[in-house]
Structure formats: C-alpha cells, structure tokens
Amino acid sequence: MANNEIRFDRRQRDDRGVLEIVLHIDGTPLTELIDRFEMDAGMQPAGDAYGGLIPEFFRFGPMEDHFHGRSTNAMGPKTPLLGCECGEWGCWPLMARITVTPELVTWDSFEQPYRKTRDYTGFGPFQFDCHQYDDALRVLSAVIGSDADDARV
C-alpha cells in the first residue's frame, strides 16, 4: 500500500478565538474526506459535522503522544482525530486506532462513538511514513509553542 502524506495545519477560529488543529491527508483536510465518505454512504447527519481539535479545550498532552495514540487512556483505545464543528471533541468526535511501527504510522478502525451502527470499514486505512509523520508533528509542536498568530504547518 502506498504511503499517505500527513500535514497538521494550525489556524485561529475566528468564532471562538482559539487555535484549531486541522489534519490534512494527501493535501485534503480530513474534515472534507470524512464528510464525503459519510454523505456518499447516506449517513445522517452528515456534512459539516466535524472540526479540528482545539488543544485549549482539552488537555491532549504533548502532540507527539496524542498523535501516536499514547494520550488517550481515559478515552479508550482510540484517539480523537477530529472534534465537532462546534469546537468540542467530545460532542461529535471522529476516533481511530493509531498504530506506530518503526516504519509506519497507521490510522484505521475509524468510528463515530455516538453512532455505533455506522460502518467505516471503507474509510482508510491511512498509512504514513514514520519519518514524515514525526517531522510534521515536530513542526506542529514548535508552532503551537510559538506566539505566531497564524501559521501553516
């Protein structure tokens, strides 16, 4: 399977005045990918339901730990990748299993925990080169720690 490319974008949410992290896979926001999948599958509600993660609203811990699936013990075995469009991840999260090997980071077993009957087996898996993934995470962590108003990671 070909590797995907990950990018973590940081942006200010004008409606809430907070930092939001939006994930991009192969240049497309994960929010768009999941919206398209859910709408094509006839899921309701669907479309514009998800937003990025807002670290200020929840203590995810270090981004490296979170996006390696190590910060979610209190949330179960899966990791929230997206939150609700309202800004709260617990309201309407997209969860996935994150598996890390020396070569690859894999996201699979996606779920919307509040709609257990939804079938996401056709969504993903996404596999990232471990070095590219970790480089993107290091940039994200550096940008989150900076005072820049708006940066693209």
Image: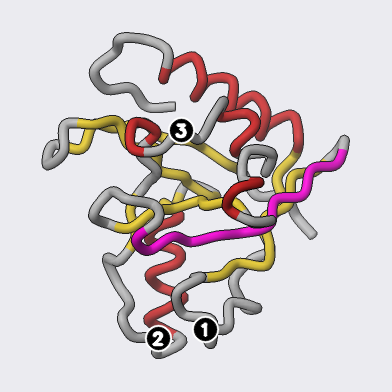
Locate residue 10, reporting x and y percent.
Answer: 36, 31
Q: Is residue 122 above or below residue 126?
A: below
Assess disc 3: are there few (<14), some (14-19) or many (≥20) residues with their C-alpha within 10 Å of its C-alpha. Answer: few
Task: Give, as a three-letter code, the residue at label 2.
Answer: Met
Determine if the magenta segment contains residue 43: no
Q: Pointer 2: what residue? A: 43
Seen at 75% across and 39% down, the residue is: 129
Q: Pointer 3: what residue? A: 59
Q: Over which residues does the magenta segment extend?
A: 91-101
Element on which disc 2 rests: loop
Element on which disc 3 rests: loop
Name the residue at the front extreme: 74
Locate residue 149, reporting x and y percent.
Answer: 24, 17
Q: Estimate the spatial distance between the alpha carbons at disc 1 and disc 3, rounded to whole Å.
A: 28 Å
Seen at 52% across and 52% down, the residue is: 80
Seen at 64% across and 24% down, the residue is: 135
